[in-house]
Each structure stands twice: as structure tokens, then as C-alpha cells.
Image: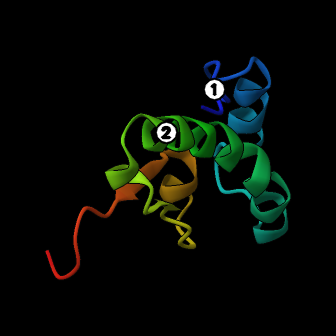
Amino acid sequence: MRRQFTGWPEQAMDVLWQLQGEPTKATRERHRADRERPMIALLNEVADTDPRYEDFSVRHYRADSWWWQNQSAVIRLGRKI
């Protein structure tokens, strides 16, 4: 088991401060990896618990800032469901 997820780091709040309001596309892209990393670690740990959950993606990177300020993920359990 990887055991990567230790919770959201304190720096996560700094990322949210940078993404508040209407951040530019450059700002959103600059913080994308920092925003994704904790969620990916959590999803990897879930997949380590049960291999059925290893097909996942972190989603919602639209132009509207709401999607950048609210994170979600999808775990695909089967095709065409």
C-alpha cells in the first residue's frame, strides 16, 4: 500500500486564496498540480484498498472559476454505466 494521503496540507488554503474571485487562466494552470495532488493521493489510497476503484479522474477544469474553487473526482466502476 502506498499510504500517500495524510489529509489536505496547510498550503491547500493558500491555493484556494490564489483561486478566489476570477483568477486568470495562467494562475489556474500554475496552481493546478497543487490543487490536484491531495485528491489524487486520496484516490490512490482508496484504489489500494480495493482495485475496483483504480480507474479515477479529478475533474472540472472549465473556464468558470467555480469549477476551480470546488474540486470533484469520478471513480469509474464499469463501462457504459
Relative to 8, say whether 74 is above or below.
below
Left of 66 or right of it: where is 81? Answer: left
Pointer 2: residues within 10 angstroms few (<14), some, or many (20+)? some
Q: Give the labeled residue for mark 2.
A: 48
Q: Is residue 74 visible?
A: yes
Horizontal and vertical percent position of residue 54: 44, 55
Q: Say which element carries label 2.
A: helix
Hey, which residue is sitting farthest left in the picture? 81
Whether the residues at callouts 1 and 2 have beta carbons within 8 Å, the answer is: yes
Q: Is residue 19 visible?
A: no
Which residue occupies 73% across, 21% down? 9
**Separation of residues labelled 1 and 2 (CA atoms):** 8 Å
Which residue occupies 77% across, 53% down? 33
Which residue occupies 45% across, 44% down? 47
Which residue occupies 25% across, 62% down? 77
The kind of residue tagged 1 is: Arg
Left of 28 or right of it: where is 41? Answer: left
Horizontal and vertical percent position of residue 5: 62, 27
Q: Nearer the viewer, residue 73 or 79?
A: 79
Horizontal and vertical percent position of residue 79: 23, 79
Q: Give the labeled residue for mark 1.
A: 3
The kind of residue tagged 2 is: Asp
